[in-house]
Image (spheres, helix red, strand yellow):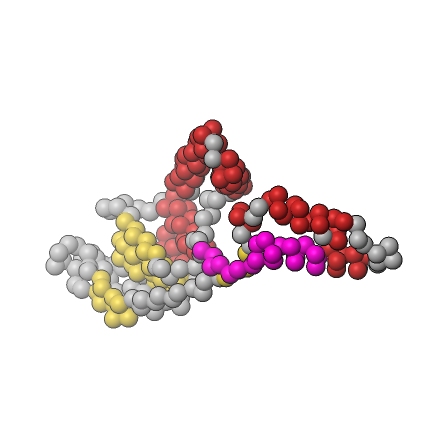
Amino acid sequence: MAAAVNLQAGFYSRVTSTFFDELSSTLETLVVHGCPVVVGGDLNVHVEDPSDASAARLSDLFHAMDMKQHVTQPTHQAGGTLDLIVTFSDFNVDNLNVDPPGAVSDHSLITCNLPYRWTTPPTPRRRVRSWRTVDRDALRQAIMDSPLGCGKIPASATADELFAMYDRTLRDIADQFAPEHTVQSKLRPLSPWFDSECRAIRRNCRRLERLYRRTRSAADGQALTAAQRHRSTVFKDKRDRY
């Protein structure tokens, strides 16, 4: 996955501190996602002039993010390198071409080749037990009939032996009622906006879902639906505001 940031400073407008703050926040967010980033557009910053304050600030920002600006030729009829293509330093840009300005507009048309990299991340696997399908009464009876439930524990057993018996007995019962099997976990993208409130809402939805699966009552179904709608509203609001 690659992220493209299209920047347009505006016709004959000078960039402001707000522009640099927002650009910095955007790049910091993209760095967290770990994907290739291509910044392109007319920034109205004379990067060819080292004495320009905006050019120096932009250069410092790109340097702090380990990014490289690839356009080195004038891109405007009046002179100046205003249209930029910026990537992380390890992202190659090939066959970059800057057409003479004036053909279509007073800016140059800039074309280049960008490497396309698609890597399939490994799908994590984990061992789980299907406890939802277990007959709880039968499970309870099996524990009661075990040496742990019948009290058939040697009085001379040490603490280590007791822990081993406890672990072995419960594992044997678990393997009988809910054998382990392998499942594939879903990879989910990072969501910086997902906070403690979101986790609490998600836990509540899962709790209500488990309750409804057991009871199948209309009241529990309505509570689950209301919680899911509330979750969607809160998540969308947090995502949009972020």
Q: How many marks?
A: 0
Along the line of sight, the residue nearer the viewer: 70 or 162: 162
Residue projecting furthest to the bottom:
95
Residue 86 at x, y percent in the picture: 34, 60
Kindly identify the residue that appears in the image at 52 percent across and 38 percent down.
Answer: 214
Kindly identify the residue that appears in the image at 41 percent across and 38 percent down.
Answer: 232
Residue 111 at x, y percent in the picture: 22, 64
Instruction: Specify whether residue 230 is in view.
Output: no
Quick check: is 8 in the magenta stretch? no
Kindly identify the residue that appears in the image at 47 percent across and 57 percent down.
Answer: 185
Horizontal side, residue 155 vs residue 210: left or right: right
Residue 134 at x, y percent in the picture: 56, 48
Residue 142 at x, y percent in the picture: 66, 50
Q: Is residue 97 above or below residue 59?
A: below
Along the line of sight, the residue nearer the viewer: 115 or 12: 115
Q: Quadrant of the C terminus?
A: top left
Q: Which region of the structure is painted magenta?
A: 167-186
Instruction: Specify whether residue 8 is in view.
Output: yes
Horizontal side, residue 56 vs residue 149: left or right: left
Kindly identify the residue that appears in the image at 81 percent across and 54 percent down.
Answer: 153
Along the line of sight, the residue nearer the viewer: 183 or 197: 183
Quick check: is 176 in the magenta stretch? yes
Along the line of sight, the residue nearer the viewer: 6 or 166: 166
- Examine the image and state in which quarter residue 2 appears: bottom left
Horizontal side, residue 98 vs residue 63: left or right: left
Q: Quadrant of the N terminus?
A: bottom left
- Examine the image and state in which quarter residue 159 appears: bottom right
Residue projecting furthest to the left:
103
